[in-house]
């Protein structure tokens, strides 16, 4: 737990990484913003903290009985619904889901990374305790309602849980064209399953699986054989046996309905944490452990050999992004060794959006040009901020110029003779033939959608604890369509990078897109981690700590609130 000096001028918290952070002006703590944390996972301490805030409880010496949280605003990342919507009401009741207390109903996620700083891609092990089926959205919501001045709620289905959900039937959007689909790990590289693990096999072919194992299928097998991959060296019946232990697959529809409800309940909520992860193995269902003498009854954490396919993760991500786009919410995005896939996804969805919006914008502005005789004010942007192509913008300008000239010429003509009137009528007929028939094209006061398309791209998105390459960062910044992309950095993840890489990443991010985060599960470490990250950025960018805090705080407010 971080120890802090309560000197009114400076504090010197001990960093959870084992180093001592230099002094930090006390008045700056209230301006600190945490773009990504999971402090609701430390259920006992977050409960004590919020109780202290509510009651002002203190000990006899006048000091707080719980470690303080000095950071001004924090984004709490919910990772899955608090109700197991795939279970019956009886099953949910058995899990104690009806409780709304701060102590119960929270998933406890943690990340274990390799201790070596020589790699820029830490090995990730997924673990959580045996309350994972209860989720944490309700807890996040409760904390945000009780302390709106400190917490911004975030709700999403984390990629580590996507294997539990079925994709929507009849969902539009089409299959995502995967980058290097089925490619094996590079020779000498780190395998997702460990350095000695073999390459992964593709998901089982449904027709082959059906014929080979139809007589012994578990009810869950048909779902999991579609969405999971296992090593080629795994036993032949490994996936069948695993399916028996994994939870019953849940329908995605009810979870999306609950996601929308939570977002609408909190008008400033962020959608997250969602994302893509090529390395995280599907966790083994929790197993109750006997009570230990030291009182630590945490059940052992184990992972299986299975990975969730990127295609399935993309399908789940797409449906969540649709909600963010429709409600105009920001998104916090988790991405591990899948930046190329996500960049391709953004490009493909951006192309669809451009085609639809450019056509609609062209037709709408063409209608205004004809209605005003060429005097309409033309915009180079579509309603969602997509810039029209040069050819499209040039066509609109020519149309407006020609109509304006015709109007000017018509106003100066002497129309006193019948002959001239007849000639004008003939010219008008010819002109009408050359102009588009606005009524036939469907241009009315309300422009209809030409092709059924549900927007997928949100207005703003944060790549949390960004760990991709400099080239990928620049490629993401070059996108000329939504979302506006921010990049946040944490000591927990990015602090393990080689110093040269971290310096290059920090320098490459525009100062108006830079965020800091703790990415920690306990509030007692948040202040120290944020201070250490702020001071790291200050050294790299040549700013003062106050400048860094002010800039990242301003960026945080723009990311969250727009």
Image (tube, rainbow, N blue to C red):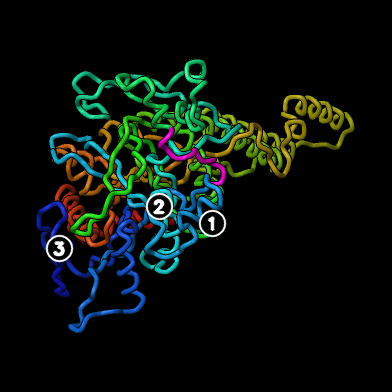
Can you name the residue that lies furthest to the bottom here? 60
Residue marked by disc 2: 78
Query: Picture quarter containing residue 269?
Result: bottom left
Who comes first in sequence, dot 3 or dot 1? 3
Q: Position of residue 503 (x, y in %)?
A: 17, 41
Q: Position of residue 60 (x, y in %)?
A: 20, 84
Image vertical order of residue 247 relative to residue 200, above or below: below
Tell which tag, 2 or 1, sits nearer the viewer.
2
Mark 1: few, some, or many residues within 10 Å (few <14, many ≥20)? few
Question: Considering only order in the chain, which callout, 2 or 3, is on the residue closer to the N terminus?
Answer: 3
172 relative to 274, above or below: above
Q: Position of residue 460 (x, y in %)?
A: 43, 46
Q: Which residue position is annotated with label 1? A: 264
Q: Bin the neighbour count of mark 2 within 10 Å (Cα to Cα): few under 14, some 14-19, many 20 and up.
A: many
Nearer to us in this view, 125 or 7 = 125
Of labels 3 and 2, the one closer to you = 2
Closer to the camera in the image, 115 or 490: 115
Name the spot of residue 264 as percent of width and height, x first.
54, 56
Cα separation, mark 2 vs mark 1, equals 15 Å
Give, as a single range, the part of the protein colored magenta: 244-255
Q: Quadrant of the C terminus?
A: bottom left
Q: Which residue is mark 3?
A: 13
Q: Identify the mark nearer the N-term, 2 or 1.
A: 2
Secondary structure of residue under mark 2: loop
Distance, label 3 to label 2, CA atoms, is 27 Å
């Amino acid at each position: 737990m971080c120890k802090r000096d309560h000197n009114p001028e400076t504090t010197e918290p001990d960093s959870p990484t084992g180093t001592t952070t230099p002094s930090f002006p006390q008045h700056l703590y209230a301006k600190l913003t945490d773009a990504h944390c999971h402090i609701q996972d430390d259920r006992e301490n977050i409960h004590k903290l919020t109780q202290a805030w509510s009651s002002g409880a203190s000990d006899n010496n006048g000091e707080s009985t719980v470690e303080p949280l000095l950071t001004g605003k924090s984004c709490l990342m919910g990772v899955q619904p608090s109700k197991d919507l795939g279970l019956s009401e009886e099953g949910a009741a058995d899990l104690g889901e009806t409780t709304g207390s701060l102590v119960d109903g929270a998933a406890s996620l943690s990340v274990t990374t390799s201790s070596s700083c020589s790699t820029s891609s830490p090995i990730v092990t997924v673990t959580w305790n045996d309350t994972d089926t209860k989720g944490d959205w309700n807890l996040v919501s409760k904390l945000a309602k009780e302390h709106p001045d400190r917490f911004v709620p975030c709700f999403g289905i984390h990629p580590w849980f996507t294997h539990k959900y079925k994709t929507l039937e009849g969902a539009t959007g089409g299959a995502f064209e995967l980058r290097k689909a089925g490619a094996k790990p590079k020779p000498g590289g780190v395998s997702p399953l460990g350095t000695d693990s073999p390459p992964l096999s593709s998901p089982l072919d449904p027709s082959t699986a059906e014929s080979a194992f139809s007589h012994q299928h578990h009810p869950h097998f048909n779902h999991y054989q579609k969405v999971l991959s296992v090593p080629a060296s795994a036993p032949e019946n490994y996936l069948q046996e695993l399916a028996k232990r994994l939870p019953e697959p849940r329908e995605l529809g009810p979870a999306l309905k609950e996601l929308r409800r939570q977002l609408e309940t909190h008008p400033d909520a962020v959608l997250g944490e969602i994302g893509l992860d090529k390395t995280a193995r599907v966790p083994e269902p929790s197993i109750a452990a006997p009570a230990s003498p030291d009182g630590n009854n945490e059940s052992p954490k184990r992972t299986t050999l299975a990975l969730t396919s990127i295609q399935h993760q993309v399908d789940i991500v797409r449906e969540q992004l649709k909600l963010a786009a429709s409600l105009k919410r920001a998104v916090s995005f988790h991405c591990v060794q899948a930046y190329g896939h996500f960049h391709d996804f953004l490009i493909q969805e951006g192309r669809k959006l451009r085609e639809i919006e450019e056509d609609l914008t062209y037709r709408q502005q063409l209608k205004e040009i004809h209605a005003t005789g060429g005097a309409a004010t033309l915009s180079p942007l579509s309603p969602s901020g997509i810039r029209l192509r040069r050819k499209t913008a040039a066509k609109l300008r020519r149309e407006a110029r020609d109509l304006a000239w015709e109007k000017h010429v018509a106003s100066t003509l002497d129309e006193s003779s019948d002959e001239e009137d007849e000639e004008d009528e003939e010219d008008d007929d010819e002109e009408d033939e050359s102009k588009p028939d606005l009524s036939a094209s469907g241009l009315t006061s309300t422009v209809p959608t030409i092709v059924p398309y549900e927007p997928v791209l949100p207005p703003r998105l944060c790549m949390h604890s960004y760990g991709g390459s400099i080239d990928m960062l620049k490629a993401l910044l070059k996108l000329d369509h939504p979302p506006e992309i921010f990049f946040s950095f944490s000591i927990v993840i990015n602090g393990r990078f080689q110093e040269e890489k971290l310096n290059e990443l920090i320098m490459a991010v525009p100062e108006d897109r830079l965020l800091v985060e703790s990415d920690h599960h306990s509030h007692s470490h948040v202040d120290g981690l944020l201070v250490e990250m702020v001071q790291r950025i200050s050294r790299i960018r040549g700013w003062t700590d106050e400048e860094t805090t002010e800039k990242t705080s301003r960026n945080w407010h723009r990311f969250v609130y727009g």
